[in-house]
């Protein structure tokens, strides 16, 4: 039986007073014995949190939704049009057999996902969402360019078939990669994805600001795909890196047993890191 409930959440929505939001959320999170990290910025909220009681996380999520002025998860189910970026709090639930975070951190940041492109506002426009059930057909089209917007150490342990790895070490390097490959991308359908949906959502807003018209992204990210799509139908190879002590998840959002090398900080599955100890 899993010891902890885990929720990854994000929303792009104007936050009038991030400092007040942090103080109120911290008070609730400490009272509910929640651990994990939540980033708070004028553009919204982003984080992964855990607690022994799922109801504790649901109460925190309700408060986040209130500060963001957006629909809760239950209310979103009643909303037919899901193409705007500022009407919902995106939640993805999983479990952990052991405590996935050592402590609680609520941080005030300029951005909830750092791109350093001030002209990009996902609250104004984003690409077209693609449900996990429709993703396979999209990325199997040879005329579609599939872009993994995650960092190189994440891509290393798993990605979708046909996906291009930009080789970025940080998300803020993505605009430079796009600029260097503009001619290859021009006029194409671009299908982007990331772990939980936030980076590819901001990436599509950036791509649109750069003049790319047909831009799409995986709704709920890899995590929702691994939750919804049966392994026998999957076009995903490997494991999905997550930013907690579980390290990586597979289909059904089960822990894969990956570890992080203390030397190179890369994830590995075997008894020792093949990068730092190739003999094993």
Image (cartoon, rainbow, N blue to C red):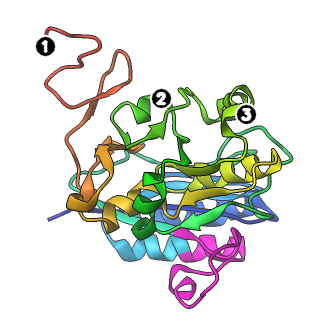
Give the mark nearest the N terminus, 3 or 2.
Answer: 2
Q: CA distance from mark 3 to mark 2?
A: 20 Å
Disc 2 crowd rating (10 Å Cα; few below 14, some 14-19, many 20+) is: some
Q: Position of residue 66 (x, y in %)?
A: 66, 77
Look at the image and say whether residue 89 sits in the magenta stretch: yes
Q: Is residue 34 visible?
A: no
Q: Position of residue 61 (x, y in %)?
A: 53, 72
Look at the image and say whether residue 85 sits in the magenta stretch: yes
Give the mark nearest the N terminus, 1 or 2.
Answer: 2
Disc 1 crowd rating (10 Å Cα; few below 14, some 14-19, many 20+) is: few
Q: Position of residue 256 (x, y in %)?
A: 21, 45
Residue at x 72%, y 32% (from the top left corner): 183
Residue pointed to by mark 2: 152
Between residue 145 and residue 52, name the one nearer to us.
145
Q: Position of residue 6 (x, y in %)?
A: 37, 61
Residue at x 77%, y 52% (from the top left corner): 208
Residue pointed to by mark 1: 280
């Amino acid at each position: 039986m899993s010891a902890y409930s885990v929720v990854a959440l994000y929303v792009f929505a104007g936050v009038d007073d991030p400092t007040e939001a942090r103080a109120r959320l911290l008070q609730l999170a400490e009272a509910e014995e929640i651990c994990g990290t939540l980033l708070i910025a004028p553009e919204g909220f982003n984080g992964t949190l855990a607690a022994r009681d799922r109801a504790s996380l649901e109460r925190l999520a309700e408060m986040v939704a209130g500060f963001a002025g957006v629909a809760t998860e239950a209310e979103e189910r009643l909303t037919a049009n899901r193409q705007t970026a500022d009407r919902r709090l995106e939640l993805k639930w999983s479990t952990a057999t052991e405590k996935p975070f050592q402590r609680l951190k609520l941080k005030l940041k300029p951005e909830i996902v750092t791109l350093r492109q001030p002209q990009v506002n996902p609250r104004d426009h984003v690409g077209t969402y693609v449900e996990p059930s429709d993703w396979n057909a999209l990325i199997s089209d040879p005329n579609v360019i599939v872009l993994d917007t995650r960092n190189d150490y994440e891509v290393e342990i798993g990605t979708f078939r046909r996906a291009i790895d930009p080789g970025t070490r940080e998300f803020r390097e993505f605009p430079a990669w796009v600029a260097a490959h503009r001619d290859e991308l021009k006029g194409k359908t671009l299908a982007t994805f990331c772990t939980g949906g936030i980076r590819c959502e901001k990436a599509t807003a950036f791509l649109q600001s750069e003049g790319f018209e047909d831009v799409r992204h995986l709704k709920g990210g890899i995590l929702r795909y691994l939750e919804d799509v049966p392994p026998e139908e999957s076009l995903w190879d490997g494991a999905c890196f997550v930013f907690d002590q579980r390290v990586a998840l597979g289909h059904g959002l089960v822990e894969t047993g990956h570890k992080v090398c203390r030397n190179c900080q890369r994830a590995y599955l075997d008894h020792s890191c093949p990068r730092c100890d190739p003999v094993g």
